[in-house]
Amino acid sequence: MANVLPAEKRLRVLAALLDGNSIRAVERMTEVNHRTITRLLLALGAGAVRLHDRLVRDVQCSLVQVDEVWSFVQKKQSRVTEADPPDVGEAHTFVAVDATSRMVICWRVGKRDQATTDAFIKDLRARMLVMPQLTSDGFAPYISAVGASFGPSIDYMQTVKNYRSGSRGRRDDDHRYEPPRDPFITKSVVYGAPDPAKASTSYVERLNGSTRHSNGRMRRLCYAFSKKADHHAAAVALNYVAYNLCRVVRTLRVTPAMQAGITDHVWGLDELLETLTTEEEAAAPEAQPLTHREPSAPARPLPNGRGFLRLVTEPTPGLKQRRRSEPPPPAASPVQAVPPPAPDGPVQLSLFDPPEGS
């Protein structure tokens, strides 16, 4: 007969994990063996994925922000050799957030490449019912992934943050954590007719900071990093599901799931634990036809309800530049100074001006 961890012990382990503690720290706090904690983490992570697939689907939100969170498994990428498994090294977590409710719509753990980006955007598309305005950073694989899943009719804009100024950039003590502010953010339209005033990644970046605080495996400069990829993925899933259901956003005064209309109350850890351990396997969400919303920027509707086409009211900065075929504008003639009148008599030249009053 297998040993079953008591419910009170499991609840203490879950609370310690969601507070950002490492496995060894949870072992010292709860007096539970670290192997038992790892097995419980894997089971709760799998249950979190099943619960998220059941609850978060048919999402109707108009503003979505996506970003990537850096972490690593077992060793950093510069230390990876050909003998290491492919899941060792950098492990980026792609995450999509509803800017209105702060709810995590989906996530994907993997390498920061085109394949992971395609799978992440495809999962985001499968959970949506309304064509949103999407905002991301300047990561190039987003363009083809968004175009393949949502089509060119989506309102998609990239916001690029310039962390270096000049040719060499800042090299003072805070150059990593306090970037230059002028100019700092550059926005560019990729698809559709997005509203530049609503294009931002502030909420998803704020979520990244909270995630590093509540998930010790993503914390920088510490020894709580993951040693196996499946452990890392389980911890990420458990953290995001607990954030949606249990964490009260201070500005909203409700949880993200309550703001999005998924639940009507704040989940306690005991309810979360019982649901994760009993959640049954369900089919993953599938893509449904999207309803196009009315864009706020000047746009023209496309035929057959395929979306909207952005109306360009003024040339882009690149088009404002002078073309090579055009002749250069004539140079302004320099203003010639009028010479002073010549004196009548001889003039005494001196290397020094005479003193005043002489």
Image (cartoon, rainbow, N blue to C red):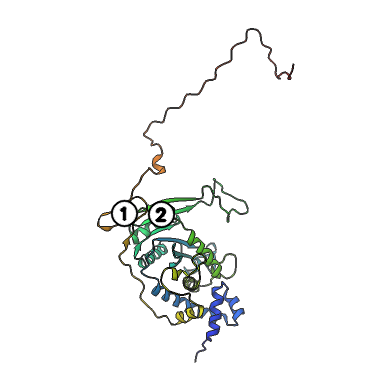
**Residue 294 screen position, x and y as percent:** 33, 57
Q: Quadrant of residue 220?
A: bottom right
**Residue 253 screen position, x and y as percent:** 50, 68
**Residue 166 screen position, x and y as percent:** 54, 45
| Whether residue 342 is situated above or below residue 18 in the rendered picture | above
- Between residue 75 and residue 63, name the one nearer to us: 63
Mark 1 secondary-structure assignment = strand
Checking the image for residue 143, the label placed there is none
- Between residue 138 and residue 290, name the one nearer to us: 290
How many residues crowd mark 2 within 10 Å: few (<14), some (14–19), many (20+)?
Answer: many
How many residues crowd mark 1 within 10 Å: few (<14), some (14–19), many (20+)?
Answer: many
Whether residue 106 is visible: no
- Which label lies toward us, 1 or 2? 1
- Disc 1 marks which amino acid? Phe
Distance from Cα at disc 1 to Cα at disc 2? 15 Å
Mark 1 lies on residue: 308
Mark 2 lies on residue: 157
Q: Residue furthest left?
A: 304
- Between residue 27 and residue 180, name the one nearer to us: 180
Mark 2 secondary-structure assignment = strand
In this rendering, position of residue 48 left or right of residue 291: right
- Disc 2 marks which amino acid? Met
In this rendering, position of residue 353 left or right of residue 293: right
Which quadrant is home to the C terminus?
top right
Whether residue 331 is visible: yes
| Whether residue 177 is situated above or below residue 287 in the rendered picture | above
Dot 1 and dot 2 residues touching (CB under 8 Å): no
Q: Earlier in the sequence, mark 1 or mark 2?
A: 2
